[in-house]
Structures are given as structure tokens and as C-alpha cells.
């Protein structure tokens, strides 16, 4: 299946041809720092044909010293972008960077033992279709 994605400012775009073999919601402290949210949402493909369509010069990769943790992002807008593994065939794609439906649902929540203290019963929190204006 062909998937396309981009960053928030639109300077970077990519295409990946693959079937995702995992979709994990990671609650580890590193993914929370990466996203500024309760968890990272990443799709994994072990055998992928990946290419940057435009803006590869804006792609920056940060690798946390002495760990396997890394992330790629747009240097202009900060959006999370796919991380190509050194074998160039496996890729980790932030689900929010896709412009189309990935065609799969999350596989599992992982690292729940280190989730944020406030990440409890979030389905019970009031939900709105859009941001409410302040009057």
C-alpha cells in the first residue's frame, strides 16, 4: 500500500510503500518528551520502499546518546517525520505525519508502566468537536 505524508508547514513530503506490521502507542518518558503529549503514535514497517518527495534538506534527526532512541523532524516547523533505520528498508512513521489513513488500528499501548500520572481515564474527559472560543 502506498502512503503519503508531510510536515505541518508543507516543506517536507514523503512516500512509503509498505504494509505496516505494527502500530504502537508508546507511553515511555522519551516519547512523551518527543511529542509533548501522553504518548507517541508510531507505525512500523520492516520492509518498506521509502522516498522523500521534497524538502529532505529540512529533515533533522536527533539521536539520544547511549540509547536506541531517535526521532526525525522538520527543521522549519518541528513536525515529527519518519525515521529511516540504517538498513534503509525499515522505517518508523509517526502516525500523525501521514496524509492518508494508514489502514490499520493501533496494535497496543506500550511502556504503560511509565505513563504520565495524568494519563488516567481520558475517555471520561468531556470531549468537543473543536476548540471552544472564550467569550
Image: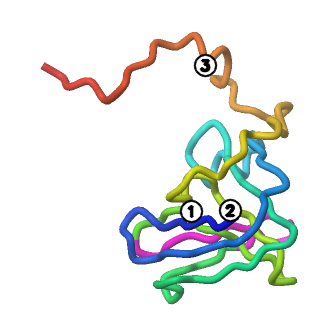
Q: In the drawing, what numbered circle is on residue 122? A: 3
Along the line of sight, the residue nearer the viewer: 129 or 120:
129
Q: Name the residue located 81 percent from the left edge and 64 percent from the top edge.
A: 45
**Label 3 secondary element:** helix
Q: CA distance from mark 2 to mark 1?
A: 9 Å
Q: Which residue is labeled 2 in the image? A: 93
What kind of element bears circle 2?
Answer: strand
Q: Position of residue 97 (x, y in %)?
A: 55, 59
Q: N-terminal of the two: label 1 or label 3?
A: 1
Give the image quarter of residue 67.
bottom right
- Within the image, what quadrant is residue 85 found in? bottom right
The residue labelled by disc 1 is 80
Q: Of the residues tagged 2 and 3, which is closer to the observer?
A: 2
Q: Which part of the image, by quadrant, shows the C terminus?
A: top left
Q: CA distance from mark 2 to mark 3?
A: 25 Å
Residue 44's spot in the image, x, y percent?
79, 59
The residue positioned farthest toward the bottom in the image shown: 57
Count residues near mark 3 (Cα–Cα under 10 Å), then give few for <14, some for 14-19, many for 20+. Answer: few
Q: Earlier in the sequence, mark 2 or mark 3?
A: 2
Please provide percent x and percent y for residue 49: 74, 79
Specify which label sits upstream in the sequence, 2 or 1: 1
Q: What span is colored magenta in the figure?
A: 63-76
Q: Residue at x 40, y 74 (%)?
A: 76
Q: Secondary structure at mark 1?
A: strand
Separation of disc 1 and disc 3 at Cα? 24 Å
- At 46% from the left and 66% from the top, the residue drawn is 7
Amino acid at each position: 500500500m502506498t502512503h503519503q505524508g508531510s510536515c505541518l508547514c508543507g516543506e517536507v513530503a514523503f512516500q512509503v510503500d509498505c504494509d505496516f506490521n505494527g502500530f504502537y502507542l508508546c507511553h515511555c518518558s522519551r516519547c512523551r518528551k518527543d511529542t509533548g503529549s501522553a504518548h507517541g503514535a508510531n507505525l512500523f514497517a520492516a520492509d518498506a520502499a521509502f522516498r522523500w518527495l521534497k524538502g529532505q534538506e529540512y529533515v533533522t534527526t536527533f539521536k539520544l546518546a547511549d540509547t536506541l532512541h531517535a526521532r526525525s523532524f522538520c527543521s522549519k516547523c518541528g513536525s515529527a517525520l519518519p525515521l529511516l533505520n540504517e538498513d534503509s528498508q525499515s522505517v518508523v512513521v509517526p502516525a500523525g505525519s501521514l496524509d492518508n489513513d494508514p489502514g490499520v488500528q493501533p496494535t497496543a499501548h506500550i511502556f504503560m508502566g511509565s505513563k504520565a500520572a495524568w494519563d488516567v481515564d481520558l475517555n471520561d474527559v468531556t470531549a468537543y468537536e473543536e476548540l471552544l472560543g472564550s467569550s
